[in-house]
Image (tube, rainbow, N blue to C red):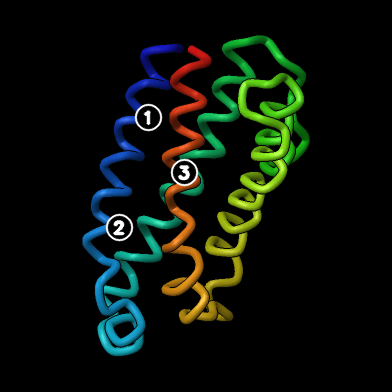
């Protein structure tokens, strides 16, 4: 299981590098280039979904209580101090973001994606570092 988690961490870091290349001129490109928009939203979804998957894998690996939701999976990591509880509370919002991308994509505010979400991706790196230290 540890090997699978480490491989997933590497894949997420690769996705983050790709997203980083998509950041310049996000606002203008997202409204005019459907391929750009699709790629960006796809990679954001994969990153958010993979972060939740890692939480579920850690829960199984460490034999912790099973979550009832994606949000709770991140919360459980905080409760068990795998990630700091305050960080877990904020980072668990990635589960809501994942759900939003998969179900409400017609209502996306692209300005928020470009100006806020892309600016918070450092939190994913922080999360991955906490996870790697816990293995």
Q: Is residue 124 above or below residue 30?
A: above
- Horizontally, residue 58 falls left or right of residue 133, namely right
Determine the secondary structure under disc 1: helix
Q: CA distance from mark 3 to mark 1?
A: 13 Å
Residue nearest the observer in this picture, 93 or 70? 93
Instruction: Please report the residue visible at 45 percent of the width from the left and 74 percent of the height from the top.
Output: 115
Residue nearest the observer in this picture, 93 or 125? 125
Residue nearest the observer in this picture, 68 or 15? 15
- Horizontally, residue 19 falls left or right of residue 98, namely left
User: Residue 113: percent from the left, percent from the top?
Assistant: 47, 71
Residue identifier under label 3: 124
* Earlier sequence position, callout 1 versus callout 2: 1
Local crowd size for mark 3, using a 10 Å CA cut-off: few (<14), some (14–19), many (≥20): some
Local crowd size for mark 1, using a 10 Å CA cut-off: few (<14), some (14–19), many (≥20): some
Local crowd size for mark 2, using a 10 Å CA cut-off: few (<14), some (14–19), many (≥20): many
Residue nearest the observer in this picture, 16 or 104? 16
* Earlier sequence position, callout 2 versus callout 3: 2
Which mark, residue 19? 2
Q: Is residue 55 above or below residue 59?
A: below
Q: CA distance from mark 1 to mark 2?
A: 16 Å
Q: Nearer the viewer, mark 3 or mark 1?
A: 3
Q: Nearer the viewer, mark 1 or mark 2?
A: 2
Residue identifier under label 1: 8
User: Residue 85: percent from the left, percent from the top?
Assistant: 72, 32
């Amino acid at each position: 299981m540890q090997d699978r988690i480490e491989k997933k961490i590497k894949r997420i870091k690769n996705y983050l590098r790709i997203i980083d290349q998509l950041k310049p001129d996000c606002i203008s490109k997202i409204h005019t280039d459907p391929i750009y928009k699709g790629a960006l939203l796809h990679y954001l979804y994969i990153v958010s979904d993979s972060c939740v998957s890692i939480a579920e894998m850690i829960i199984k690996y460490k034999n912790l209580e099973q979550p009832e939701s994606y949000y709770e999976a991140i919360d459980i990591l905080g409760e068990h101090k795998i990630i700091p509880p305050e960080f877990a509370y904020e980072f668990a919002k990635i589960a809501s973001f994942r759900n939003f991308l998969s179900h409400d994509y017609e209502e996306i505010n692209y300005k928020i994606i470009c100006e806020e979400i892309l600016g918070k991706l450092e939190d994913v790196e922080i999360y991955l570092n906490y996870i790697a230290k816990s293995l």
